[in-house]
């Protein structure tokens, strides 16, 4: 599975704080909505190339701006962004503080917003650490850092990945993860012998789940394809864990959540019994 990509997330004029946010995912903030990918969700709206990509709750923006005004001795201008690299940007010109924040902060709990204000105004180190931890825990709200090349293929001869993905999302993740896309992978060369097979993969840079086309067979049950999707979505919401010099792609929390899949034991048993047939297919 791909390892999360590092992002320098805070920028000031003439200086930068060396913190990062890994690329993993979950639904975007309720106070700011990102326009879903039109290849997946058809909207009765049309935007020009320069049209909006996010809708921001103005009341939430003003409330956070007011917190900054109380703490800063001068005028404050706050803008909300969907930037993929810089979560916080601030400049001070002629006594005016201009701040650009990623939309994830709009519905942050009060202690996080208070720490955010303290960091922006005074550069407090403890506040910076709390804000950094919040970004790492919510970096799933950062949009994809790489565009997907080529068309998405979700409808197979047997299984419809878009339908299965939506069901898995609504059942186990509480809301549709519109930033996560899915496609069947490339078909292997006919007659090629395999000793191993990767049934699914998740690209954090693309926010894309790929499913091996060998699973688009009448003898492959829907619950198993759903399990593969569930496993890859867990990579979307649970980042790899670095322990010492090792990176755990499946940390303890991942393994705990994986067992919550309704047909987990059944899916594992099916895979073990059919692995030879999958390799030959």
Image: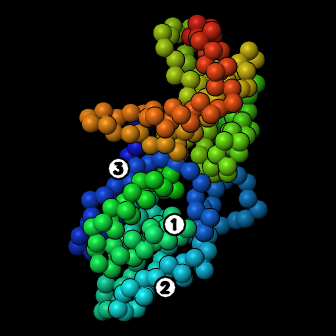
N-terminal of the pair, mark 1 or mark 3, is: 3
Q: Is residue 52 left or right of residue 110?
A: right
Residue 184 in which image quadrant: top right
Residue 136 numbered tag: none
Horizontal and vertical percent for residue 96?
36, 89
| 79 lies left or right of 181 | left
Residue at horizontal 60%, vertical 80%?
A: 59
Q: Is any part of residue 206 visible from this angle? A: no
Q: Secondary structure at mark 3?
A: loop
Label 3 Cα crowd, 10 Å radius (few <14 / some 14-19 / many 20+):
few
Q: Quadrant of residue 8?
A: bottom left
At x 40% / y 91%, what residue is drawn? 75
Residues at marks 2 and 3 touching, judged by CB atoms closer than 8 Å: no
Residue shown at the point (57%, 76%) measured from the top left: 60
Q: Secondary structure at mark 2?
A: helix
Q: Quadrant of the N terminus?
A: top left
Residue 66 circle label: 2
Estimate the spatial distance between the alpha carbons at disc 2 and disc 3, rounded to whole Å. Answer: 31 Å
Cα gap from disc 1 to disc 2, whole angstroms: 15 Å
Q: Where 209 sits versus 126, above or below?
A: above
List x then y, in percent, for residue 185: 58, 29
Give me the disc on residue 6. 3
For label 1, the residue is 108
Please state which of the two labelled residues, at mark 2 or mark 3, is closer to the viewer. Answer: 2
Towards the viewer: 61 or 47:
61
């Amino acid at each position: 599975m791909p390892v999360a990509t590092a992002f320098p997330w805070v920028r000031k004029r003439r200086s930068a704080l060396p913190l990062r946010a890994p690329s993993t995912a979950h639904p975007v903030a309720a106070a700011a909505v990102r326009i879903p990918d039109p290849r997946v969700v058809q909207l009765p709206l049309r935007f020009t190339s320069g049209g909006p990509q996010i809708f921001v709750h103005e009341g939430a923006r003003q409330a956070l701006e007011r917190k900054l005004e109380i703490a800063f001795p001068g005028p404050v201008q706050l803008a909300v962004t969907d930037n993929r690299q810089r979560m916080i940007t601030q400049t001070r010109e002629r006594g005016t503080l201009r701040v650009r924040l990623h939309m994830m902060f709009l519905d942050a709990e009060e202690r996080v917003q208070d720490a955010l204000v303290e960091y922006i105004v005074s550069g407090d180190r403890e506040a910076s650490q709390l804000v950094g931890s919040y970004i790492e825990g919510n970096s799933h709200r950062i949009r994809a850092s790489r565009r997907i090349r080529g068309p998405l293929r979700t409808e197979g001869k047997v299984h419809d990945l878009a339908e299965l993905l939506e069901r898995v999302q609504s059942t186990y993740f509480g809301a549709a993860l519109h930033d996560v896309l899915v496609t069947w992978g490339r078909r292997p060369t006919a007659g090629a012998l395999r000793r191993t097979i990767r049934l699914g993969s998740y690209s954090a840079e693309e926010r894309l789940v790929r499913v091996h086309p060998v699973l688009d067979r009448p003898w492959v049950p829907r619950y198993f394809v759903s399990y593969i999707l569930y496993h890859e979505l867990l990579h979307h919401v649970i980042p790899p864990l670095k322990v010492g010099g090792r990176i755990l792609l499946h940390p303890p929390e991942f393994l705990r959540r994986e067992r919550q899949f309704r047909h987990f034991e059944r899916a594992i048993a099916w895979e073990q019994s059919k692995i030879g047939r999958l390799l030959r297919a």
